[in-house]
Amino acid sequence: MTGFLHKLAVSSVVFFATVAESSETYFCSFVALNKSDWIPPQVAMQLSDNRKSAQVWASEAGTPVAANMERRSDSSYLLDWTASRSFAAKATGLIGDRYRVILNVENMKVSLQVLSEIASVPHSSRGAGTCVLVENVLN
């Protein structure tokens, strides 16, 4: 986890240097709700442009993935992204992975759903967790 946070911090500094609007970075820890499925233990999410765009770090590779972002309520957001092939290769048994997160910035709770197909049978795994605001930059 320390390596993940270090890579996130370095990536955030580089990214923040180019951002003209506010951004917030959340570090979230998950617990799998299904025993047979793979859920990432940690995910970092950066909400940018006054919460109009998002990037996600879902592995220790340090490379962010752009996420589609939709406001669900005054305090919650839906983030939807597709995992890179290298990240998906680390998740045994999952192909064509799509991730959906509901982040509540008020109570710092988060839920995650992995949408995948295994041998043409729709499959979904779920996780739940909590987040910590690790950086809030206002420009």
Image (tube, rainbow, N blue to C red):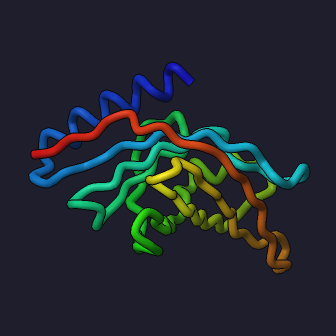
The quadrant holding residue 28 is top right
Position of the N terminus, as image quadrant, is: top right
The quadrant holding residue 77 is bottom left
**122 to 59, vertically: above or below:** below
Left or right: 95 in relation to 87: right
Question: How many circles with numbers are drawn on the protein?
Answer: 0
Q: Residue at x 45, y 27 (%)?
A: 5
Which residue lies most toward the right here? 36
Q: Residue at x 59, y 53 (%)?
A: 110
Left or right: 89 in relation to 34: left
Which residue lies most toward the top here? 2
Q: Position of residue 81 (x, y in %)?
A: 50, 65
Q: Residue at x 43, y 49 (%)?
A: 45
Say which of 19 and 21 sits in front: 21
Q: Position of residue 72 (x, y in %)?
A: 47, 74
**78 to 108, vertically: above or below:** below
Q: Position of residue 112 (x, y in %)?
A: 64, 58
The quadrant holding residue 9 is top left
Say which of 122 and 113 sits in front: 113
Left or right: 108 in relation to 20: right
Left or right: 125 in relation to 55: right
Q: Residue at x 75, y 59 (%)?
A: 126
**30 to 66, vertically: above or below:** above
Q: Position of residue 108 (x, y in %)?
A: 52, 47
